[in-house]
Image (cartoon, rainbow, N blue to C red):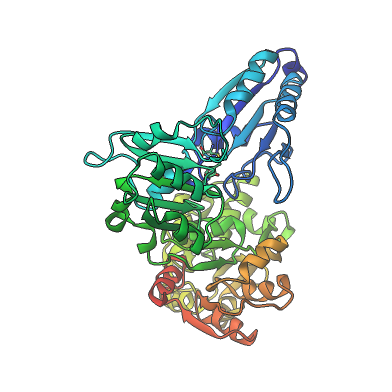
């Protein structure tokens, strides 16, 4: 960092999008991943900072409920001070930094201080929240213009910056930010200034987020409807004929898992695929990883097995994690896929076979159902009598597979590539999980560790979804009632079963 301090760092004014973690830009993620320091606001998507460097300085500069925000000049000072020290600084803001984000003021302060800066636009709430509500802000037939307006000002004030008669006459869609508190006055002013009281209108609270709520009405009735529904900030208000398009174009609420909160308990490293699929189906996903994979590939047993890999007649892998770690162990020993050239390779199920394929190995044998019994069945046609077999797996796995292979006369070595240990999630994540509609378990260890993590508490109204019979048995042993069991014992099978139930 010393060599940087001579030329000074850059400040990036970055938009983080309206809230859906998928609506952050590639450029924003790149900068987050490399920044020395990140100064961020309240309305940034959950998990946006997950990709930050572990040693990056993360500074919250937004408002806390009931508290005041850090004054704007202080924020600018903080940016300047860090850039002068040669740091690469990301200033992360909700939506777009130059749309009611005070990004312009911060850029001016940087210019005044002679600091290099870049602007990364973001998806702004005024477009995204209506879009997620099924409202296009422009439309060939309905709106050839759109105005972004601040609703922050008190319309009671005499000298307001807003020209209400001009807004009332504006030939297109009005989109108001920060206006929900002043909505009664805003609507009254627009109507008094000549805007059609029967014009369609909408309010979108927490747009693009899991809890998005939308109210549609008319200019005259919106304030009452929004009051009755109790919408609060952050909410986008919209006035214009396009609001009526929602009836036909509303798509969010039609997704199969809309409004359902689903808890994913698997290890963070594996959870993302499942979480993404569920979120794509409209679920409000709570990632509550209760287990973590601790690699054990440095153990003498694993090293010896990798050293002798070419001597096994059969190598059995029992999870995608196991595949990844076996290849890590091989790489550490200076070996590659060719070390498996002599052996038959068996995968417990399709996910494990896929993990092998990604590393250039096609499994010779595959279980149909991702349970040991299924692999045992599939191995019936493989001669193992008197032959060396390696079972590479998790430390705490069941012994069905090695026992059966030994019974058939194989010389079985079992090595543990990893251990599953308990994760300690944040208290608010546990609290969010307690209000779940569905609780998903993908292994016995997720069941056990869930109860340890929550101190034995279970979400009252949640239906339990299990990936397969072994996990179901563990769940029942732990006192859960299993509502749904996947027919195919993999994440896709679990999702299919859950959707069916919902
Ligand atoms: N720079 C931001 C806007 C910041 S002003 C952007 O470009 O989106 C804050 C206002 O933005 C809130 O009062 C609200 O009106 C709106 N807003 C931000 N996120 C929102 C969301 N997810 N849903 C609805 N409105 C949102």
494 on left or right of 178: left
Instruction: From the viewer's side, name the closer residue of 408 and 211.
Output: 211
Q: How many numbered marks does the figure carry?
A: 0
Rendering coords of residue 183 (x, y %)? 50, 49
- Relative to 427, say whether 249 is above or below: above
Instruction: From the viewer's side, name the closer residue of 498 and 145.
Output: 145
Viewport quadrant of the N terminus: top right
- Relative to 16, say whether 502 is above or below: below
**Residue 107 seen anywhere in this rendered image of the structure:** yes
Query: Hey, which quadrant is residue 334 in on the image?
Result: top right
What residue is rendered at 65% in x and 46% in y?
332
Rendering coords of residue 361 (x, y %)? 45, 54
**Residue 333 seen anywhere in this rendered image of the structure:** no
Rendering coords of residue 372 (x, y %)? 52, 76
Residue, far left: 141
What residue is rendered at 64% in x and 31% in y?
90
What residue is rendered at 63% in x and 51% in y?
329
Viewport quadrant of the C terminus: bottom left
What residue is rendered at 46% in x and 59% in y?
224
- Relative to 189, say whether 482 is above or below: below
Instruction: From the viewer's side, name the closer residue of 233 and 123.
Output: 233
Instruction: From the viewer's side, name the closer residue of 436 and 350.
Output: 436
């Amino acid at each position: 960092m010393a060599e940087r301090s001579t030329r000074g760092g850059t400040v990036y004014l970055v938009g983080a999008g309206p809230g859906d973690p998928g609506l952050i830009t590639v450029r924003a993620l790149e900068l987050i991943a490399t920044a020395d320091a990140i100064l961020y606001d309240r309305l940034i998507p959950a998990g946006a900072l997950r990709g930050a460097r572990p040693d990056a300085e993360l500074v919250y500069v937004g408002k806390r409920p009931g508290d005041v925000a850090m004054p704007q000049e202080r924020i600018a000072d903080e940016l300047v001070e860090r850039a002068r020290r040669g740091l690469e600084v990301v200033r992360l803001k909700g939506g777009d930094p130059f749309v009611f984000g005070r990004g312009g003021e911060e850029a001016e302060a940087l210019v005044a201080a002679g600091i290099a800066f870049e602007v990364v636009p973001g998806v702004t709430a005024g477009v995204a929240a209506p879009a997620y509500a099924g409202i296009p802000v422009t439309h060939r037939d309905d709106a050839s213009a759109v105005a972004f307006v601040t609703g922050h000002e008190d319309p009671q004030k005499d000298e307001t910056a807003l020209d209400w008669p001009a807004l009332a006459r504006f030939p297109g869609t009005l989109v108001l930010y920060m206006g929900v508190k002043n909505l009664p006055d805003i609507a009254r002013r627009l109507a008094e200034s000549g805007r059609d009281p029967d014009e369609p209108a909408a309010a979108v609270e927490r747009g693009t987020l899991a809890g998005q709520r939308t109210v549609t009405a008319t200019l005259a009735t919106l304030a009452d409807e929004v009051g009755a529904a109790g919408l609060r900030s952050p909410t986008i208000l919209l006035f214009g004929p396009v609001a009526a398009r929602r009836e036909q174009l509303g798509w969010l609420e039609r997704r199969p898992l809309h409004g359902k909160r689903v808890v994913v308990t698997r290890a963070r490293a594996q959870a993302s695929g499942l979480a993404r699929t569920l979120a794509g189906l409209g679920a409000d996903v709570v990632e509550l990883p209760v287990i973590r994979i601790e690699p054990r590939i440095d153990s003498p047993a694993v090293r010896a097995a990798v050293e002798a890999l070419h001597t096994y007649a059969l190598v059995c892998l029992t999870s995608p994690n196991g595949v990844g770690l076996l290849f890590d162990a091989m790489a550490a020993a200076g070996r590659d896929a060719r070390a498996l050239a002599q052996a038959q390779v068996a995968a417990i199920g399709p996910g494990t076979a896929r993990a092998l394929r990604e590393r250039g190995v096609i499994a010779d044998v595959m279980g149909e159902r991702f349970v040991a019994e299924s692999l045992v069945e599939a191995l019936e046609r493989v001669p193992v009598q008197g032959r060396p077999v390696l079972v590479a797996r998790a430390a705490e796995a069941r012994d069905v597979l090695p026992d059966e292979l030994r019974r058939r006369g194989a010389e079985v070595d079992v090595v543990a590539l990893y251990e599953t240990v308990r994760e300690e999630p944040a208290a608010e994540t546990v609290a969010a999980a307690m209000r779940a509609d569905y609780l998903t378990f993908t292994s016995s260890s997720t069941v056990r560790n869930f109860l340890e993590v929550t101190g034995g508490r279970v979400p009252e109204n949640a239906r339990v979804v299990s990936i397969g019979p072994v996990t179901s048995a563990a769940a029942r042993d732990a006192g859960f009632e299993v509502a749904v069991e996947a027919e195919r014992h993999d994440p896709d099978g679990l999702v299919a079963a859950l959707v069916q139930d919902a």
